[in-house]
Amino acid sequence: MKTFTQNLLFTIAMLWITVSVSAANKPPLEIENPNAKQSLVLNGLNQYADVPQMLGGLSQATLMGWIRINADLTATSFIMGQDNFNLKIVADANGKTLVATAKNHSIAFDQALSADRWYHICVVYNQSATEKLKLYVNGRQEAAAAPNVLTGALSASAAKFTMGKNPLSNTDYFKGAMDEVRVFNTALTDAMIQKMVYQEIKPNGTRIRGEVVPRDIEGTNWSSLLAYFRMDVSADDKLFNRASTAQAQLYNAPVFETQMAPMPFETSAAGRIDAVVGQNNFVNGRDLSTYNWSIIQVHHNINIPSNQINLGMIIDPEVSVNLTNDNKLENTWYLKLDGKLDLKGKSQLVQTIDSELDPTSAGYIERDQQGQSNLYNYNYWCSPVGNTNTSSNNNSYSVNSILRDATNPDNLLNINWTNDLNGAPTSPITLSGFWIFKFQNTTPIYANWTAVGPNGTLLPAQGFTLKGCGASTPKQNFAFVGKPNNGTITSPIAAGNLNLSGNPYPSALDANAFIMANNSVINGSLYFWEHFSTNNSHNLADYQGGYAVRNLVGGTAPVSPVGTSMTAASKKIPGRFIPVGQAFFVNANTVGGSLTFNNDQRAFMKEDATHSNVLFKNGTDPISEQYDNSNDPVEDDNFARIRLGFNAGSFHRQVLLGFMNEFATSGMDMGYDAHNIDTQPNDLYLMNLNYKLIIEGEGYFNANNIYRLGVKTLGVGNVEFILDDVQNFDEDQPIYIYDNVTNQYHNLRWAPFQIYLPQGTYTERFSLRFTGAPLGTGTFTAPTHDIALTFATNDNMLTIENGKPEVNVQSVQIFDMLGQSLALWDVHAKDQSKMQILVPPISTGTYVVKALTTHGDISKKIIIK
């Protein structure tokens, strides 16, 4: 038996062993409330933290963290780092300046920091870069060392890495708060820094992932983190290091407070958020509109009146975000949409190439768009949304599931559907489901339209047709409601086939970017259907309308009634940017493949903008100019273009010749030459070989080149050639129609050219030319040496002397250099030997006087000073 003493010794020994084992297995720190979000507060007197040196000899390094400085900080204050690489505040009479130092060379942020405001600060050293030392504030580079000032790796150092005081002495204590201190052994890029600023980070395998945005930060590796102090966990005067076992020692009992750095921005109340009125509608921070890489957590119903760009946005369930001023919400990395995003008016959601819509998003967007009310007129639509679910994006849909009656935009109604041919302006409106068709990946014949109806299935980027309800107003307001499409969307199209496709996004689509991305698959032109407002029949043979065309050269208006060529029709020229909801035809080339849409083709461009496609142009409500809702910038090109108009019968046709320099040739070029797909009874086209073109892209302008025109007339009568538009041409450059039968040149700069033609097709008679006419002449059929036109600039008197008794001058007309008539005088009854006309005051410039005689026309250029 064991004695009492033996039992006591055994018990003590076992207790010692238990304690030793427990101590050995104990984590480095007791975690006190691991869910707390805290910042470290230092008193500027003796409080700080340090950890063994980690920067000596590094060829690359990055320091970052959040700071808030106190108002009474009046001296140099060390924030973080070692003697060889650090960040500090220099406080003097000029304010509190942020300074970064590497190897005894310093750079500074040129704006004084404000007290009691949170700033994210970061410094990067890279011995291989041109700018070896760079300083960032709130994710933006604000200073850099000049090239060649620094060389080599960071110096060796025995000093500890300190937070809150000089690493070489007990001086320069920091007074304020700090949070999220991170030390890397690599040089982070701008994109990496910006994705870390407004969120905490964590490991995801070998990668660094955001705590708020659940995506890996591209190009990063968790192993590059030497130290990561969240300030959330401390015990035993130690600060937990999430990157290594090297915990930081805390000195003189600094305190902790609730985290207030914006990681992320979080709304604090319902209402408007903007930078104009200085409203602080956030729990933490006011830099929402200043930095485009903000991350925003929306807990309340908010209105956004200004363009807003963010890196991440999370919209909570039962929450509404309203864009109220025809403005944009642009997201560059991550969107979680569990509530409602209301894109009022012409507002748009733009997701850029790296932007991800979380597929688990349960919310939706609303986006208004206007279509024709005419019972008989087709609109070509393409939905920017699909059906909502919590597992996938870019979902299929039916017209009935996503389209609403938005006659009152604040009270969306389900549409009534009928099988009759006609809809009705009821409330809610009644539309005919009979007219909903698609045309997908099939040969271009009319019989291949496929009926869809209101409940048939459509896929993203597939277009559909729909007719109006017959309301008395010309436009009917609809709303698309559903999960927004985003990212890459593909649609098959076999060689030679035709697709009714469209803009699949709740933002404008850049036609140029789309064409260039698909130029190996399609013939490079987009065709937009436009019904005339006078159309009053469902019968195909009676349809009035045509296709507007767009390619890399530019756009042409659809065929239109004569009389509107320089007004309404010319405004129907499709611009570069395709609006939300707009569908169009594309034709595969001889190879075909898959159409590809992606976020790189998206932009913010309102429909009333100069560069937009305005086929769906609607009236604009008054908007506030106090807030920025400007379109994305577009650089205008300087290519020379001619839009040639042709009037015959009751219709006006427009064709486009563009000189694209090195981008096009005289041959057939995909993306630059557009075929005529809606030949009219009376028509004009540009002839290239045997191809009939609506748009022709040419190389460099050469005044000696000749461009053959094709003309078709249904009956006997007058036709007219006219300049609809001229861009980037020298105003003195003549533009001729040459008639190969009469051998006459007709300068369209001076006046339209009219000619009487029999019924028929003419492919060799007319051409567009730029030289070859006798110097100073326009249309010459009269014996001009016997009829003299002179102009006296001192009294603005135009004199006509007619030396041919058998010729009568009927009228005299004056034109500007664009061919616009400024004045017309009837002179047929005047004394023909000598007529004098007082020209009314007009601006200084060059003009053309045209005299119409019984034997032809005479034109003369005059200069008014």
Image (cartoon, rainbow, N blue to C red):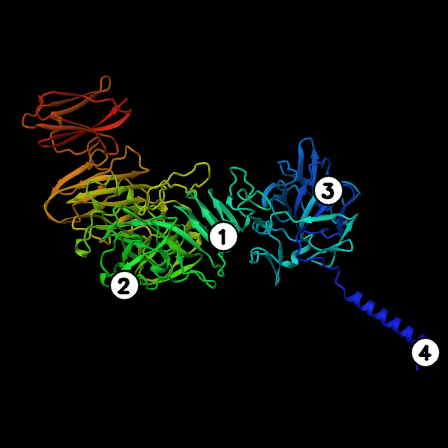
Q: Amino acid at mark 1?
A: Val
Q: Are marks 4 and 1 in contact (CB under 8 Å)?
A: no
Q: Quadrant of the C terminus?
A: top left
- Residue at the spot x=46%, y=53% of the render? 340
Q: Nearer the viewer, mark 1 or mark 3?
A: 1
Q: x, y (%) of residue 760?
A: 12, 49
Q: Earlier in the sequence, mark 3 or mark 4?
A: 4
Q: What is the distance, in whole Å, between disc 4 and disc 1 at their CAs?
A: 75 Å
Q: Position of residue 17 (x, y in %)?
A: 84, 70
Residue 612 in the figure: left or right of residue 391? left
Question: What element does badge 1 sit on?
Answer: loop
Image quarter hosting the N terminus: bottom right
Q: CA distance from mark 3 to mark 4?
A: 63 Å
Q: Quadrant of residue 170?
A: top right
Q: Which residue is mark 4?
A: 3
SS at badge 3: loop
What amino acid does circle 2 point to?
Ala
Q: Which mark is residue 451?
A: 2
**Residue corresponding to mark 3:** 174
Residue topped by disc 1: 319
